[in-house]
Amino acid sequence: MKRSTFIQTCLYLTLALCVAAVGLKVYRTDLRQTGGFGGELMVLLSPVFFGMAAKRAMHMGRMASIIAAVGVLLAAGGLAASVSSQTQTKGLIGRPHGP
């Protein structure tokens, strides 16, 4: 696999993982009880900047590949944290609905 193809694949994978983590966080959080997201969404989206930086720094060679791989690892960690978080969830059985 060429280096540019690897970096492009890492960028798309990072983007997909970040969007999945943010989507899951938005879906599972009940804003009426938690009061908002704060800076949590920016933290979940920040690995995308690693992928974009790696694509921009493709002339640096191996270092760009390492930066792209780190972005994928951080995005996977954000998704794992989003899946395993203990946030207030919507629509659980036995929990009263309404304001």
Image: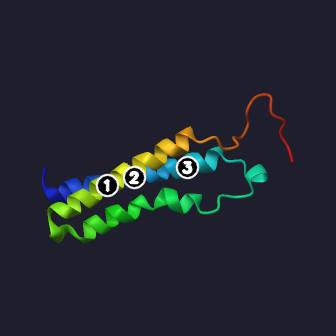
Tell me residue 96's x, y (percent).
84, 36
Residue designated by label 2? 74
Label 2 CA crowd tier, 10 Å (few <14, some 14–19, many 20+): many
Which residue is painted at 48% across and 59% down in the image?
45
Which residue is painted at 63% across and 46% down in the image?
27
4 lies left or right of 54: left
Label 1 CA crowd tier, 10 Å (few <14, some 14–19, many 20+): some
Tell me residue 47's x, y (percent).
41, 59
Residue designated by label 3? 23
Single out the residue that lies furthest toward the right.
Answer: 99
Looking at the image, is mark 3 or mark 1 earlier in the sequence?
3
Q: Is residue 58 above or below residue 28?
A: below
Question: Which residue is more in the foreground, 85 or 11?
Answer: 85
Question: Which residue is more in the foreground, 15 or 49?
Answer: 49
Disc ID at residue 70: 1
Q: Secondary structure at mark 3?
A: helix
Disc ID at residue 82: none
39 lies left or right of 52: right
Which residue is painted at 26% across and 66% down in the image?
55
Tell me residue 83's x, y (percent).
54, 40
Q: Secondary structure at mark 1?
A: helix
- Tag 2: amino acid: Leu
Tell me residue 80's x, y (percent).
48, 42
Q: Are marks 2 and 1 in contact (CB under 8 Å)?
A: yes
- Tag 3: amino acid: Gly
Work out how far the residue at label 2 is from the one at label 1, CA to CA, in angstroms.
6 Å
- Tag 1: amino acid: Val
Work out how far the residue at label 2 is from the one at label 3, CA to CA, in angstroms.
16 Å
Work out how far the residue at label 3 is from the one at label 1, CA to CA, in angstroms.
22 Å
Q: Are marks 2 and 3 in contact (CB under 8 Å)?
A: no
